[in-house]
């Protein structure tokens, strides 16, 4: 059972019994907001309100992931800084096909756990297209090679577009069991950003069918789920609960217009998602990748701003 979030409060202690103080107020019982109410354990707790030290509504630490692309050479040093300062718990890396040879060694220098995101249809992988079976497998092999080089696990795959879930199932089942044991399938919006294609895996039923037929795990993209519910004219909160009952291994989180059918990936606080309600539904002790906009060419301070937003919920 998940705990209801105390509005405006943040857990500031790593103690056995979580202690909460106002995130907005300046002082409470002579303890500054954001400070540990157990100064004797403050060094142990190490809570600075960011990244791996940010406490979630269950009184344990958030495991927040930084989402980048394998070709983002410009963010390598910034990502290294965030990992060193423990402002992200892991890095989720989207693998651009053919990028391992040039960029793999750069990411290897960062001392952080990795999650790998496989290429999607914009880079040629479409598990819903029977004509792409051979090329899909080749791209998957490249992706697993990159993952093994970084000791990364798990690997996230999209179910494909403009096809049916049965083809996605057939292709996944053609792959080695060792691959499938590491794969998480991600739910998708009902339609692509340009509105021209229909995505596979856009409902709880579709994801459940793929999981049961292949044995793969599940990455729950919350924004995708909301968009799909709007397209399918179903209740987004009820669908969120149904997705959650599938036991996601991890999550993707962003902000958007709650009524939109189109995926937005806005920075947190730049849409109108009710994160209090979302966090009452999902398991906030699991990995959460922040899939939000990167506005700066040489800085990841927008990621840090997203983390600070979570601290103030």
Image (cartoon, rainbow, N blue to C red):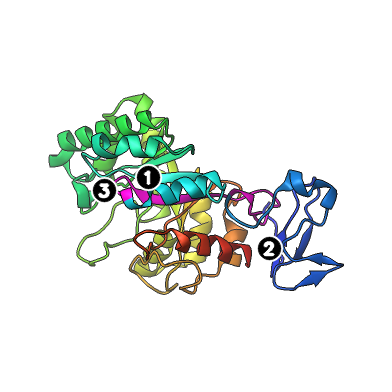
Q: Is residue 247 visible?
A: no
- In this view, which residue lies farthest toward the left? 131
Depth check: give the residue in front, 61 or 106. 106
Residue 136: x, y in percent? Answer: 21, 38
Residue pictured at 24% horizontal, 38% vertical: 102
Is the residue under label 2 in contact with that under label 1 (CB below 8 Å)? no
For the residues labelled 1 and 3, the Cα–Cα distance comes to 13 Å
For the residues labelled 3 and 2, the Cα–Cα distance comes to 35 Å
Q: Secondary structure at mark 2?
A: loop
Depth check: give the residue in front, 106 or 245. 106
Going by the image, does 187 lie left or right of 48? left
Q: Mark 1 or mark 2, which is nearer to you?
A: 1
Q: Which residue is mark 2?
A: 5
Q: Which residue is mark 3?
A: 120
Q: Which residue is mark 1?
A: 93
Query: In which quadrant will I find the C terminus?
Result: bottom right
Report the span colored magenta: 52-73
Residue pictured at 52% horizontal, 49% vertical: 88
Of mark 1 and mark 3, the one earlier in the sequence is 1
Q: Is residue 13 above or below residue 308?
A: above
Indicate yes or no whether the magenta region holds residue 59.
yes
Q: Secondary structure at mark 3?
A: loop
Residue pictured at 30% horizontal, 43% vertical: 95
């Amino acid at each position: 059972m998940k705990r209801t979030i105390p509005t405006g409060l943040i857990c500031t202690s790593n103690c056995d019994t979580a202690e909460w103080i106002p995130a907005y107020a300046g002082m409470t019982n002579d303890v500054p907001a954001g400070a540990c109410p157990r100064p004797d354990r403050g060094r142990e707790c190490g809570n600075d309100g960011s990244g791996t030290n940010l406490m979630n509504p269950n009184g344990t630490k958030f495991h927040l992931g930084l989402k980048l692309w394998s070709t983002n050479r410009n963010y390598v040093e910034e990502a290294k800084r965030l990992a060193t300062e423990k402002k992200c718990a892991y890095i989720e890396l989207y693998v651009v096909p053919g990028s391992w040879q040039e960029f793999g060694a750069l990411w290897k220098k960062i001392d952080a756990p990795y999650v790998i995101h496989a290429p999607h249809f914009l880079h040629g992988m479409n598990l819903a297209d029977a004509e792409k079976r051979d090329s899909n497998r080749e791209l998957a092999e490249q992706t697993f090679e990159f993952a093994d080089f970084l000791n990364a696990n798990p690997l996230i795959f999209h179910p494909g577009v403009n096809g049916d879930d049965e083809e996605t199932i057939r292709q996944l089942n053609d792959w080695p069991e060792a691959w499938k044991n590491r794969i998480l399938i991600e739910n998708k919006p009902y339609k692509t950003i340009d509105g021209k294609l229909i995505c596979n895996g856009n409902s709880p039923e579709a994801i459940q069918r793929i999981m049961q037929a292949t044995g793969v795990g599940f990455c729950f993209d919350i924004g995708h789920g909301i968009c799909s519910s709007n397209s399918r004219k179903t209740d987004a909160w009820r669908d969120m609960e149904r997705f959650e009952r599938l036991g996601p291994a991890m999550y993707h989180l962003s902000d958007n217009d709650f009524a939109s059918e189109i995926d937005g990936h806005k920075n947190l606080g730049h849409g109108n998602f009710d994160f209090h309600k979302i966090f009452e539904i999902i398991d906030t002790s699991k990995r959460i990748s922040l899939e939000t906009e990167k506005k700066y060419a040489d800085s990841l301070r927008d990621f840090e701003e997203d983390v600070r937003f979570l601290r103030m919920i």
